[in-house]
Amino acid sequence: MKIKFYLNKKEIEIEVDPTIRLIDLLREKLNLTGTKEGCSIGECGACTVIVDGKAINSCLMLAYQVDGCNVITIEGISEDGKLHPLQENFLKTGAIQCGFCTPGMIMSAYALLLENPNPTEEEIKDAIAGNLCRCTGYKQIIDAIEVSAKELKG
Amino acid sequence: MNKEFSVIGKSVIREDAFDKVTGKAKFADDYKFDEMLYAKMIRIKATHAKINSIDFSEIENQKDIYVITANDVKGKNLVGLIKHDQPIFCNEKVVTPGDVIAMIVGEDEDKLEHLAKKVKVNFTPLPTLTDPTKALDPDSVLIHPEEKSNLIIHHPLRKGDIEKGFSESDEILEQTYTTQLIEHAYIEPESVIAIPKEDGIKIIGSIQNPFTTRRIVSLATDLPLEKIEVIQAQLGGSFGGKDDTMCILSARAAVASLKTNKPIKIKYTREESILESYKRHPYILNYKVGYTKDGKIKAMKIDILADGGAYCSMSPFVTWRTVVQATGPYEIENVHTDVRAVYTNNPYTGAMRGFGSPQPIFAQESLMDEIAIRLGITPDEIRRINGYKNGSVTATGQKLQNHDVNILTVLNKAVALTNFSNKWKEYKKEKSVLNEYEFEKPILKKNKFIDPKKLYQKGIGLAVSFRGCSLGAEGLDETYCYMSIEKNGLVKMLTGLAENGQGLRTTLIITAAETLGIIPDKIQFLETNTSLIKDSGPTVASRGTIMGTGSVKNAAEILKERLIKIVKKGFHLDDNDVIDFRENLVFSRKKGLLTNFDFVCQLALEQKENLTAIGYYKSPEVHWNEHNGQGDAYFTYVYGCQVAEVTVNIGTGEVFLNKITAVHDPGTVINRLGALGQIFGGVTQGAGYGIFEEITHEDGMIRELNFDQYLIPTAKDIDEIKPYFVEGNDIYGGYGAKSLGEPTLELTAAAIANAIRNATGKRFFNLPINLEELVLGKKIRPQNLNRGSL
Ligand code: FES
Ligand code: FES
């Protein structure tokens, strides 16, 4: 079936098999491999992308369900070659080790800041509670999100 | 030692971080090639079985579907890192449920899934052995009959006279502890692609040790090493876990690729990853300790059994570290230790961050606390009485020298930072505050109702450890680094040590920058490729930093010498003048600022000076007598102390981790950001080991195959982690940097266990101390293996 949606601010129209998942559309058909797959059952959060302002697990959503939606992936958050403050602060605080959880982690944080520009530490932890990271112990990730929230408020 | 540095010890952003925050970093599964085919594994639901026949007739006529079996393995089908006991394809029998019998290959993954069900394997179940304590019984099933016994390895250690030690003791305490099977749980599941080349093969994958992989692929394909090129993709976590499994997966992909002449990708689902990959050894540890009234330990008798599962893997080395470190960092005159690893039909076990240390640390640190409690002293006091000092002699008879033996320094620091002794005395319970349940009558009597005000109990506990750096007497220990300088002053380097996601490359870049007096941005790390550099041994045993910085510093020093000659000539300086390189600038002690680094490099190249060098670092000699376990096991050691502060809900058994204070002496800290990350990450993994994680199995069949059942810590599980570094001096490695990755993990579970004892008044002997263990004193397992996602 044919679907039409916004992907990283560009409108695209594409023929999709109704049984494929959003993550397959992104990774296999559109070559956006920044979104990762760690568990395929909605537990690890590595596949997190933003659909209409909400963080969702792209391994649990069918591709055709984004018809008419606004989808943002890790490839779409820096503008004109300039890193998004979240990306910048993930670098600076050491929030990255192997980096496999990083795209999903940043997207969960991105969705949080869209909805709540002033998150408390608890709210940040809640927002990324569904994103597993085996390397960092989360502390530097939480710092990165806190600093970014402050910067974005200006 | 001078610890004034310009780049070392500062926070430096990882060289690969930019690609990782933008989604550009390429992990193995992100690679795609034209005409690439996928491979699907064929397994059976059996723990131990003889394969009678495999029937592919239903799929044979399918177009473009290939069947790959042991018959396609041109070289050896039996491989392994130490013993060659693991088949690439199990054509004769399976010895554990993860075993792969054959593979089918085709273009469409979904179709393969469907076709795999049509392969009929006829097999006869064999009796299973899943209890390691029965493995050495004379009538036990043999997992590998050709080995004649289920014993993988036995490491004895004898020091002093154990009987004399016990007779000189005032009290003797004997305890048994058990630790559980756990999964590495790297977030990236295994993935590899084999690509046919003109006269050989290229492998790209989530590979921890490219050189080992090359060796195993060569064994399996019969291709000579130089025809196999192994490239490590960005590695999505490993923790010791992407070694044996990845070697075998790479070999399978290579075999299929040679047969079809097409690129072959194997990518595992999480379920397959947990099913087939090796894990951390479960241990059963018996400790008998004799001590005097003054708290001096006179004798320790230790008997440890490790479940190696179905294959040998790294068991001999893992348990060797155990035998060296089993007493903990305590000077004990009389020690008698036996560590054995055995085969069973359980999932096999091998290298995992910690590598044979978290298990004995849990036992020995629990025991030290029990002795302190019996003697009416505090946990820090008992450790001060027995802990190593400069010149102490270890259980292996090694005298600790040439470095700061900082065990008491880290202990005292941690105790001071947390106000340990006061809190410990305040929270201490004379007897258990937990309810004792009767299993037949699990209803509480009214007089046993928990007073809501007493529901939450606080506790504090500590654990200390020493850890041998690098491989020790496990094997050859040397590293190489190739370094070259371009005419614009750009430095390129390459080492045979692979990045595992922990930030090793950044650490090595900093070392080169420090030596050459330039900023890290001027240094570029080339991809690890087995065709380009000599093997520097595996990135294991926290050896990356200590060994890597040694060879990098050496290469940079060779180049710097040559540049100094050029500078002296070019600027007509006296021979005895001293030249300094700092922040891209070049100074003469006599004439001050001369020029910048780039200019000197240009000058050098114009004068045809050779600006390439090979750096080399070899560890000092170590030696080991395997009959009595005596010798200088490792050339140097690191020390750590962690304090856990917890709150226990005595009604539900939930343990809240309020604060973990981690004090470590890693030698010199090279990259502060990276070092902090190692502590946060290591402590978090250690906490998971302490209170959540466990792979359980029903007759060898794993229950927890995905993250819905296998629970690892999330962002919400630990309130606060406070890292603190004590930077001790050492003569080895580059700039005295040693290791940190594993020490951070090995202590946490033991510290938490001691904190729970302090909070509840009850000692727990079996990890993990999860809700059931805490409230009921036993583990509860689901009866049914069926689950939604499989
Ligand atoms: S892959 Fe989607 S949540 Fe893990
Ligand atoms: S950085 Fe490795 S999983 Fe998060």
Image (cartoon, grey):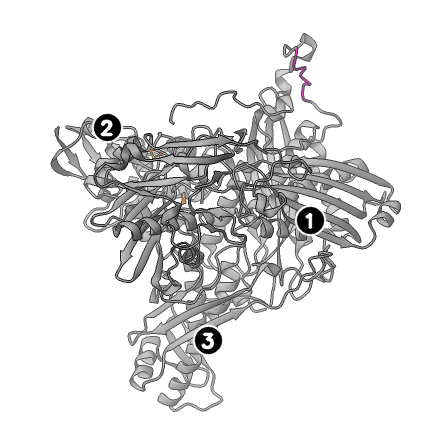
Q: Residue at x 45, y 36 (%)?
A: B51
Instruction: Please state which amino acid type lies under the numbered disc 3.
Output: Glu
Residue named by callout 3: B557
Amino acid type for the residue under numbered disc 2: Leu
Whether residue B561 is visible, yes or no, is yes
Please tell me whether residue B103 is drawn above or below residue B316 in the rendered image. above
**Which range of residues does the magenta coloring cover?**
B434-440
Instruction: Give the CA separation, mark 1 to mark 2.
Output: 53 Å
Viewer-side label of 1, 2: 2
Q: Nearer the viewer, residue B70 or B294?
A: B70
In whole angstroms, how far apart are the C-alphas of marks 2 and 3?
A: 57 Å
Residue at point 45%, 53% (across, down): B674
**In which quadrant is the C terminus of chain B drawn?**
top left
Q: Are marks 2 and 3 on the same chain?
A: no
Q: Which residue is mark 1?
A: B328
The answer to whether marks 2 and 3 mark residues whose Cβ atoms lie closer than 8 Å is: no
Query: Is B131 above or below relative to B670?
Result: above
Q: Is residue B298 magenta?
A: no
Which of the four quarters of the rendered structure image does ligand 2 lie in? Answer: top left
Distance from the alpha carbon under mark 3 to that under mark 1: 38 Å
Q: Which residue is mark 2?
A: A62
Mark 3 lies on a secondary structure that is helix
Q: Quadrant of the N terminus of chain B?
A: bottom right
Mark 1, residues whose alpha carbon is within 10 Å: few (<14), some, or many (≥20)?
Answer: many
Label at residue B377? none
Q: Are marks 3 and 1 on the same chain?
A: yes
Which chain hosts label 3? B
Subunit that carries the residue with mark 2: A
Image spot of residue B717 (x, y percent) = 49, 33
Viewed as shown, does residue B427 lie left or right of B574?
Answer: right
